[in-house]
Amino acid sequence: MTDKTDRAENEIDAGRRDFIGVAAGMTAAVVAPGVFLHSVAAAPRSEPVNSDVRWGLLVDTAKCVDGCSACVEACNEENGLNLQTPPKGESERKWDTQKAVWIRKVKLQDNQTGRITNLPMMCQHCEHPPCVDVCPTGASFKRADGIVMVDRHLCIGCRYCMMACPYKARSFIHDETSGQLTSVPRGKGCVESCNLCVHRRDYGEESTACVDACAAEGHHAIVFGDLKDPNSAINQQLKEIPSRQIREDLQLNTGVRYSGV
Amino acid sequence: MKRIVYREWRISPQRYWSILGILAAVVGVGALAFGYMEHEGHWVTGMNNSVVWGTPHVFAVFLIISSSGALNIASIGTVFQKPIYKPLGRLSGLLAVALLMGGLLVLVTDLGRPERLIVAMTTYNFSSIFAWNIFLYTGFMAIVIAYLWTMADRQGSAFKRPVGILALVWRLALTTGTGSIFGFIVARQAFDAAILGPMFVAMSFAYGLAVFMLVLMFAFNDDERPIGPVMLRRLKNLLALFVAIVLYFTLIYHLKNLYITENASLETWLLLKGGIYTFLFWIGWVLIGSLVPLGILYHPELSKEPKWVAAACALVIAGGLATMYVVIIGSQAFPIQMFPGRTVLESGFLDGVNGQAAPYWPTLPELLLGLGGVGVALLITAVGVRVLQFLPESLADDVVPPCEETIASAEADPELA
């Protein structure tokens, strides 16, 4: 009796063992890809940004088409700016002056010759950005790879950077935000501007939303790339066609260059 | 000359509490405006992505530069050793602290994220003039409180001159710093001018003295304390001089811009076609804020009347607010010239299409927030003079220390003495 009981207790419960085996296998099957993918995805971000690269844009105004706003729409979608709606009771006209705009189309006419030029304007990612100089808390900063952006945790919303920017590139978030994108967190009371799709940079993706959209339209007016890499497409083009910086006299050494202006 | 006796402001409790009640209500409404703007976001203001600093900044900067200007009276007494100004030193120090508090409160309550003020206090970027100013403002507050102590306490009197000199140097740095917040901005044509630093110092002299004189005259009148003609003449002459200096700086600023071709469009706009800004420049800044007060203050008869002198002070203050509006808001409204030689035909971000200025119109919450700051400054002053001995009992001619002007004229004409 005693022996039988002992034997029964010592007998391996095959069912239980199977269950544990299946459970462990399934857990591994469910969790492992997550862990693996997570580590793969996080890999680029685990290394600090360095100054081996300097990201920049080249705009060929000859290819920028009058009436096309593909770059603006793509930027809005990429960064969740299309989710902005006028606050209740606010007129559309006033909201147009208050909503956030990271990239805009500008149409110019030469006063002497009457020649029309179209171009997109955005943060020019200066080497010596005035917005970074004036920011009292250091929220406005330049990354080692040349991207000028705002640390949304440090920004106190004083708007001094907006006063100091020669390109009117920055926007203040005037209203409550809702339905933000995970990759582009935004918050009321902070300043923001084009960051060359920094989330794409950190995930090792190529190009920016505006560049992709312009290419998709078949215009190829904007080129994105590493200004320090002599073999990059942007550098090749900069060698070929004449280009300049907007407000060159300020000697800010902008990361965004224009040809035909 | 008699010994100067300082006494608390002894108006009737009823009158005192009703003044306090009105000021508290103004401060309360300002606080509500702050709560509203903070809760809703800045879309309820007239400010936008082109004009990023609005009416609150007009009040804040006015109060901050008036604060350093109000301290001038104490400096003239202590540092420059003009005896007749010495009885005014304590009120001058109190007003300096009170006005600075009012101005700073408006500035911080207009922030997009005011709850992050602690970030501004703990994380600094020392290339920012704003960051320097945080130290200049808090340091000024501490130095002026120490200065008040040296003026009021016998133990401190030995330190009065050194602390007074430090306060003078500090206030010059502070106001130059405030002017340089604008003057060192290369992006906007109307700002990009180092003259704004010293110009703000001159403005602070005028506005600070005008506020000081109005507060002094009101407090003395209510408590039936006398201000003698000699004291009144000295103060009004000083105010006229400061107003004239502001006008001089204004002239140089515009002459420089008119001379330089690239600024011609800015000047044409500001002086002729700028709408509200042109109006506020000529009518507010030049006429009401400068020429009319100068006319009153140098008028042989009117300048002897305290009421007219008070009116001149009020006009200088009104003109000062108009000046701040033109300097701060007008300079932002004028479009940034990104493409010289070209006209902007279309823009997705109001880049001065066809040279048009950026829109801005103040809303009520902004105005109430600014007035709230004025309320805070006056509330601190009212409580200060009531509970502590800031005000001299009399400023009559036979009480105040001798004035060099009187002595000089007596020497020239013995019969007058």
Image (cartoon, rainbow, N blue to C red):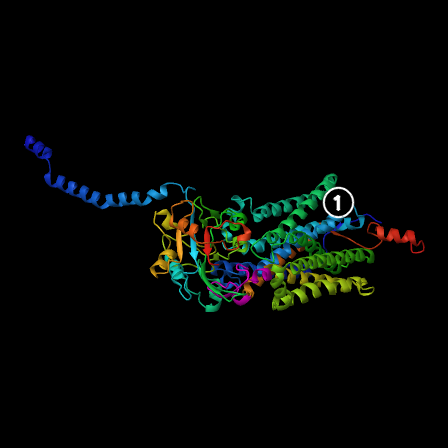
Provide the residue span drawn in magenta: B329-356
Type of amino acid at the residue the image marks with label 1? Val
Where is residue B243? Give x, y as percent: 73, 58
Where is residue B274? Give x, y as percent: 61, 67
Q: Residue B357, relative to residue B157: is it above or below?
A: below
Res B330 → quadrant: bottom right
Q: Residue A214, relative to residue A14: is it above or below?
A: below
Position of B382 compared to B403: left or right? Answer: left
Q: Residue B89, relative to residue A17: is it above or below?
A: below
Query: In the picture, which quadrant includes the C terminus of chain B?
Result: bottom right
Position of B263 compared to A169: left or right? Answer: right
Observer-nearest of B32 and B280: B280
Q: Is residue B29 visible?
A: no
Where is residue B227? Give x, y as percent: 79, 57
Observer-nearest of B259 and B302: B259
> For mark 1, what is the residue?
B79
Res B415 → quadrant: bottom right
Position of A215 compared to A255: left or right? Answer: left
